[in-house]
Image (cartoon, grey):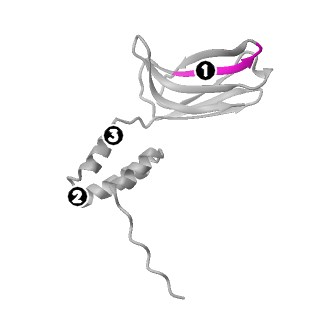
């Protein structure tokens, strides 16, 4: 049985940009390294590298566990004294939508926390969460998780 020759590897800054848009940051970094190895002055690649350097590597993972609340983990967070994990829970009610907001200080670059909400068993809800640092006047998001519903 003969093997087909493998296709040549596709190396392009445009593909790296697609990886960035899809949040595949490590693939984008590897692709940009290959582009810059071939052409150290490739403008588009250099701009994308600068964009990646400014982007946070911080990641949030969350999931709702009935009866035990919202479990949240984070890693690669900047160790800042003013970093908080912030959660907002939206719940439908007869009067419209109720909102419950709380936060907890993050004391390390990685960790986990479980949020248990008042009236948790009362039915459906949606939560948004982020890691944010407070600049004295408002939060500055470091990482944002997609909304969760239960």
Residues packed near mark 1 inside 10 Å, few (<14), some (14 to 19) or many (20 plus): some
State the mark number for residue 39.
Answer: 2
Where is 1 relative to 22, above or below? below
Q: How dense is the environment of label 3, judged by Cα within 10 Å: few (below 14), some, or many (20 and up)? A: few
Residue 73 numbered mark, or none: none
Which stretch is magenta? 85-94
Q: Quadrant of residue 13?
A: bottom left
Circle 3 is placed at which residue position? 51
* Front residue of this view, candidates 6 and 61: 6
N-term mark: 2 or 1: 2
In which quadrant of the rendered view does residue 149 lie?
top right
Q: Element at badge 2?
A: loop
C-alpha separation, residue under disc 3 versus residue under disc 1: 29 Å
> Residue 144, image x and y in percent?
51, 30
Which quarter of the rendering shows the C terminus? top right
Distance of mark 2 from mark 1, alpha carbons? 46 Å
Position of residue 127 in the picture relative to residue 28 (left or right): right
What residue is shown with label 1? Answer: 88
Horizontally, is 30 left or right of 93 in the view?
left
The quarter of the rendered structure image containing the N terminus is bottom right
SS type, badge 1: strand
Q: Position of residue 34 (x, y in %)?
A: 31, 58
């Amino acid at each position: 049985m003969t093997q087909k020759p493998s296709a040549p590897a596709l190396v392009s800054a445009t593909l790296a940009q697609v990886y960035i848009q899809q949040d595949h940051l490590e693939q984008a970094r590897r692709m940009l390294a290959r582009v810059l190895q071939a052409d150290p002055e490739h403008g588009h690649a250099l701009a994308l590298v600068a964009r990646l350097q400014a982007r946070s590597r911080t990641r949030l993972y969350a999931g709702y566990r009935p009866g035990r609340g919202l479990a949240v983990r984070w890693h690669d967070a900047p160790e800042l004294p003013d970093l908080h994990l912030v959660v907002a829970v939206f719940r439908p009610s007869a009067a419209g939508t109720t909102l419950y907001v709380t936060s907890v200080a993050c004391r390390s670059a990685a960790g986990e926390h479980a949020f248990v909400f008042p009236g948790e068993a009362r039915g459906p809800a949606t939560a948004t969460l982020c890691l944010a640092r407070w600049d004295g006047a408002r939060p500055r998001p470091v990482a944002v998780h997609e909304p969760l519903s239960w």
